[in-house]
Amino acid sequence: MAEPAVPVEPRRLILLRHGVTGWNADGRYQGQTDIELAETGHQQAKAAARALATTYAVTRLVSSDLMRARQTAAYVAEETGREVAHDPRLREVSAGQAEGMNRAQIYERFGEMPASWEPHGGESWPTVAARFSAALHEVAETVAPGETVVVVAHGGAIRQGLAAFLGWDPSVVTTLAPLTNCAWIELVARESTHGLIPSAPWRLASYGMGAPIS
């Protein structure tokens, strides 16, 4: 009689957007300007941290090195007892001359909403997707069965990096709703008892999950 299959403990990646900042509330493009969380952002981060610690056995934390992400990650670290590693590749897109502006000011300055910030002293979306997904691949390669790693970053960079990481066409990004502050995405490894499935090792398990402020 054949031995029964041994259940494989899932590997998980959680991509968490940072809490709200004053610039978020004002509709101003932050890019890589180092803005701190607003008071509501701290409350959001606390709620998300509690929810993640309750739902998942978090084994590691990786964060963008920008302050709003670092502060958010610190709450997850407090709830889970894990230290945070910081990676600048997880930063938001650099919006160059547009940082600090709202949409109306951008239209007044540039005449339209640029498809790329690169001509205005910032980055292109393919550049963001490449650096973010490279960082995510490095993390994913070290996730062991049963581990859950939380990656704290930024809305635009997460969506671009997610598409690149999963091998999607970049146009798919436009079909993804923007992540609200402190919402998260869950990725689960597709594997058998012999390891990851090479054709599609990770899949999107949930998108835009969140926790209410108590």
Image (tube, rainbow, N blue to C red):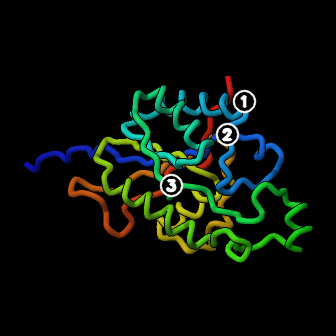
Looking at the image, residue 190 sits to the left or right of residue 180; the answer is left
Question: Quadrant location of residue 22?
Answer: top right
Crowding at mark 3 (Cα within 10 Å: few <14, some 14-19, many 20+): some
- What residue is at 60 percent from the left and 42 percent from the top? 67
Mark 3 or 2, nearer chain start: 2
Image coordinates for residue 56, horizontal then vertical, percent: 43, 34
User: In the rendered structure, which amino acid carries the disc numbered 2?
Assistant: Glu
Which one is in front in this view, the residue at disc 2 or the one at disc 1?
2
User: In the rendered structure, which amino acid carries the disc numbered 3?
Assistant: Pro
Looking at the image, residue 198 sits to the left or right of residue 169; the answer is left
- What residue is at 64 percent from the left and 58 percent from the top? 156
Q: Nearer the viewer, residue 205 or 158?
A: 158
User: In the rendered structure, which amino acid carries the disc numbered 1?
Assistant: Glu
On the image, numbered disc 1 is attached to which residue?
A: 39
Per the model, the C-alpha gap separating discs 1 and 3 is 24 Å
Q: Nearer the viewer, residue 115 or 211?
A: 115
Which one is in front in this view, the residue at disc 1 or the one at disc 3?
3
Question: Quadrant location of residue 157?
Answer: bottom right
Image coordinates for residue 173, horizontal then vertical, percent: 63, 66
Q: Nearer the viewer, residue 197 or 47?
A: 47
Q: Secondary structure at mark 3?
A: helix
Q: Which mark is residue 36?
A: 2
Per the model, the C-alpha gap separating discs 3 and 2 is 16 Å
Q: Which mark is residue 88?
A: 3
Q: Quadrant of the C terminus?
A: top right
Per the model, the C-alpha gap separating discs 2 and 1 is 9 Å
Q: Secondary structure at mark 2?
A: loop
The residue sitting at the bottom extreme is 119
Looking at the image, residue 134 sits to the left or right of residue 210; the answer is left
**Decide: marks 3, 2 in contact (CB < 8 A)?**
no
